[in-house]
Image: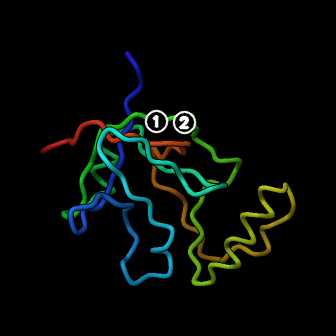
């Protein structure tokens, strides 16, 4: 039996999109859109996040979200040691930190003090295919 993975997506205007990204946010430009039974890829140099536990996915979702069972490519619990999401309004600084990290150079001096660790049971992947909606 293969490992099951779950993706939480937000339904807005008939489209499934990344969760927790407000429409008016500067971060909205990084939103990924998902189609059922089609592979979605991350932005270059990044990863997509899924859960390896259904209850964790349900806890992360809210009333406007949908939880899907999904297929993934190259699952990993760690993303090159970069296991937190940076919360900053300074997108260029965040991108610079990520570029330095990928070049294996020092980048921690650019990180904000309010680092938010990813939710429990988060898995980083190279691609996601939504396969089946989980109805409760």
Please name the residue that numbered disc 1 is placed on.
72
Residue 83 coordinates in the image, percent (x, y): 61, 54
Say few, some or many: other residues with alpha carbon within 10 Å of mark 2 (under 14 / 14 to 19 / 20 or more). Answer: many
Numbered badge on residue 50:
none
Residue 4 coordinates in the image, percent (x, y): 37, 30
Q: Are marks 1 and 2 in contact (CB under 8 Å)?
A: yes
Q: Nearer the viewer, residue 7 or 29?
A: 29
As drawn, is 65 to the left or to the right of 34?
A: left
Residue 73 coordinates in the image, percent (x, y): 52, 34
Residue 37 coordinates in the image, percent (x, y): 32, 38
Q: Is residue 122 above or below residue 109?
A: above
Give the residue displayed 29% in from the left and 43% down from the top: 36
Q: How many marks?
A: 2
Q: Residue furthest right?
A: 105
Quarter of the figure with residue 93: bottom right
As drawn, is 120 to the left or to the right of 84?
A: left
The secondary element bearing badge 1 is classed as strand
The secondary element bearing badge 2 is classed as loop
Q: Is residue 73 above or below residue 65?
A: above
The alpha-carbon separation of the residues under discs 1 and 2 comes to 7 Å
As drawn, is 30 to the left or to the right of 99?
A: left
Say few, some or many: other residues with alpha carbon within 10 Å of mark 1 (under 14 / 14 to 19 / 20 or more). Answer: many
Give the residue displayed 38% in from the left and 68% down from the top: 20
Of the two numbered discs 1 and 2 in the rendering, the one whose residue sits closer to the viewer: 1
Please name the residue that numbered disc 2 is placed on.
75
Give the residue displayed 66% in from the left and 77% down from the top: 112
Quadrant containing the C terminus in the rendered view: top left
Give the residue displayed 70% in from the left and 50% down from the top: 81
Q: Nearer the viewer, residue 120 or 11?
A: 11
């Amino acid at each position: 039996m293969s490992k099951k993975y779950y993706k939480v997506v937000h339904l807005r205007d008939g489209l499934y999109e990344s969760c927790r990204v407000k429409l008016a946010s500067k971060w909205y430009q990084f939103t990924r859109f998902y189609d059922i039974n089609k592979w979605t890829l991350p932005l270059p140099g990044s990863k997509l996040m899924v859960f390896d536990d259904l209850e964790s996915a349900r806890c992360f979702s809210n009333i406007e979200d949908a939880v899907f069972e999904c297929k993934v490519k190259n699952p990993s619990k760690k993303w090159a040691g970069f296991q937190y999401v940076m919360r900053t309004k300074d997108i260029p600084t965040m991108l610079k930190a990520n570029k330095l990290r990928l070049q294996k150079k020092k980048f921690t001096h650019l990180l904000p003090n309010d680092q938010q660790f990813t939710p429990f049971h988060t898995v980083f992947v190279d691609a996601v295919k939504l396969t089946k909606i989980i109805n409760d």
